[in-house]
């Protein structure tokens, strides 16, 4: 039960609010309307363990800032992905409350805004690997997402199969992670190799790097889907989904350790 819902029920039990008012507040805490353009879901992480992120792509800078402010007011923390320079400027100029901390993750093209003293820790550990340096932005989006969900992350980049000897020291450093995100473009071989070597569950993340026949991530996606190694695969460039899925696995693993 979320703290907001518990507080509403306690006020109802004390007779401080009517059943109708309690129902209205519960509905308001389920989602919040931002004008006529958005219905944000700040309680999603309490409900399913994965937060709603705001996708900046396709939104005007002004609309994005308004949505981010509303989300921040409801939850005290907001993750914004696919942020352009114009979006970033609008967010930096937005009237967030005193004490709010805005962090620009340039490689991931993501922004995290948190209130003073905010901290989320699940105890889970997620490893992030990329085949090439060109895959790094999508891998970084996965990293930022996993950390936003309270996981510790370990990142190792440019360890693709063209020089596979680079991979083994990285896997040794990730021996104790609960889940792995492996990003790869071109032919997308690395996740299958890692899934055949590592004990931790692997999330294959195809990246739209590479050119020619099968370019734009299509060959990487099909290669991962056809793999005989056991792993899950997300859509092309879906760094947020990969990071969130890995973090959910890692958080559940950490919960079991603490039982």
Image (tube, rainbow, N blue to C red):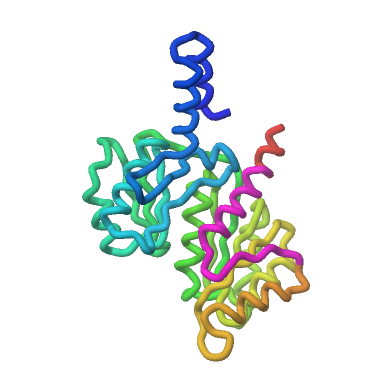
Instruction: Name the residue located 60 percent from the left edge and 61 percent from the top edge.
Output: 181
Residue 83 vs residue 155, the one in the foreground: 83
Q: Is residue 78 above or below residue 199?
A: above
Residue 198 in the figure: left or right of residue 10? right
Residue 68 vs residue 38, the one in the foreground: 38
What percent of the width, then of the height, locates residue 189? 65, 77
Instruction: Name the residue located 58 percent from the left edge and 67 percent from the top edge.
Output: 235
Residue 8 appears in view: yes
Span highlighted in magenta in the image? 230-252
Q: Is residue 230 above or below residue 17?
A: below
For the stretch drawn in magenta, what is the main secondary structure?
A: helix
What percent of the width, then of the height, locates residue 133? 48, 74
Q: Residue furthest front?
A: 20
Q: Is residue 247 above or below residue 30?
A: below
Residue 123 in the figure: left or right of residue 84? right
Question: Looking at the rendering, in which quadrant would you find the N terminus?
Answer: top right
What percent of the width, then of the height, locates residue 79? 42, 50
Q: Residue furthest top?
A: 14
What percent of the width, then of the height, locates residue 88? 29, 57
Residue 253 in the figure: left or right of residue 63? right
Residue 165 appears in view: no
Instruction: Name the residue located 49 percent from the left edge and 66 percent from the top edge.
Output: 138
- Residue 258: name its quadrant: top right
């Amino acid at each position: 039960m979320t703290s907001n819902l518990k507080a509403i029920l306690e006020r109802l039990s004390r007779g401080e609010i009517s059943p109708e008012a309690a129902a209205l507040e519960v509905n308001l805490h389920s989602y919040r309307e931002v004008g006529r353009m958005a219905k944000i879901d700040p309680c999603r992480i309490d409900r399913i363990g994965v937060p709603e992120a705001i996708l900046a792509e396709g939104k005007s800078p002004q609309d994005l800032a308004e949505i981010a402010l509303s989300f921040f007011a409801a939850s005290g923390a907001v993750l914004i992905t696919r942020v352009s320079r114009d979006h970033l400027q609008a967010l930096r100029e937005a009237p967030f409350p005193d004490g709010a901390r805005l962090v620009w993750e340039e490689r991931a093209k993501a922004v995290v805004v948190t209130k003073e003293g905010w901290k989320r820790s699940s105890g889970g550990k997620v490893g992030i690997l990329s085949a090439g340096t060109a895959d790094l932005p999508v891998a970084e989006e996965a990293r930022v997402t996993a950390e936003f969900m309270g996981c510790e992350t370990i990142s190792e980049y440019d360890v693709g199969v063209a020089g596979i000897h680079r991979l083994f020291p990285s896997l040794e450093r990730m021996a104790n992670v609960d889940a792995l995100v492996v990003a790869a473009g071109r032919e997308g071989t690395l996740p299958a190799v890692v899934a055949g070597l590592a004990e931790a569950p692997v999330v294959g993340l195809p990246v739209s790097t590479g050119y020619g026949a099968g370019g734009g991530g299509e060959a990487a996606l099909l290669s991962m889907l056809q793999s005989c190694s056991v792993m899950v695969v997300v859509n092309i460039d879906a760094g947020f989904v990969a990071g969130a899925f890995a973090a959910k696995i890692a958080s559940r693993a950490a919960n079991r350790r603490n039982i």
